[in-house]
Amino acid sequence: MTRSSDSVIERQNYGAGEKAMAEEQREDLLTVHEVAQRLRVDDTTVRRWIKSGAMEAVALPHRGKRQAYRVKKTTLDTLLGKPLPIE
């Protein structure tokens, strides 16, 4: 692909609703470090829980030593026993 075709792809217009939804979904995903801070444990512990299946997470494509994960905020809220808001 050439540079000009890359810029055409980047210029795609998304509706305001789609943009808001994408940002909302991003806010609902927590990094391993954020989860570890909230649970007051080490990052390695959270990774161990994810790998063992004790905590549900989304694996991201990666290049490097460590697999990148994101944990849904609802998963953490459930683990902490917080009730989900009624909408």
Image: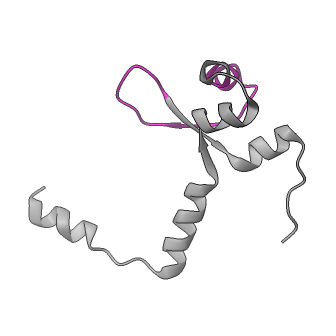
Q: Residue at x 65, y 21 (%)?
A: 42
Q: Position of residue 69 (x, y in %)?
A: 55, 35
Residue name at image x 13 percent, y 55 percent: 1
Task: Measuring from the top left, give residue 25's x and y in whole percent.
Answer: 59, 59
Q: Position of residue 66 (x, y in %)?
A: 45, 22
Q: Residue at x 86, y 57 (%)?
A: 84
**Front-most of 9 and 65?**
65
User: Is residue 55 rendered magenta in the image?
Assistant: yes
Instruction: Return the residue nearer the eye: 17 or 1.
Output: 17
Instruction: Provide the residue span drawn in magenta.
Output: 46-67
Left or right? Give the position of 75 relative to 29.
right
Q: Position of residue 46 (x, y in %)?
A: 66, 25
Instruction: Please tell me in which quadrant of the rendered image residue 34 appears.
Output: top right
Q: Is residue 62 left or right of residue 74?
A: left
Please name the colour scheme applied to the rendered image.
one colour
Is 81 one of the magenta-colored residues?
no
Residue at figure coordinates x 61%, y 44% from the top left = 30
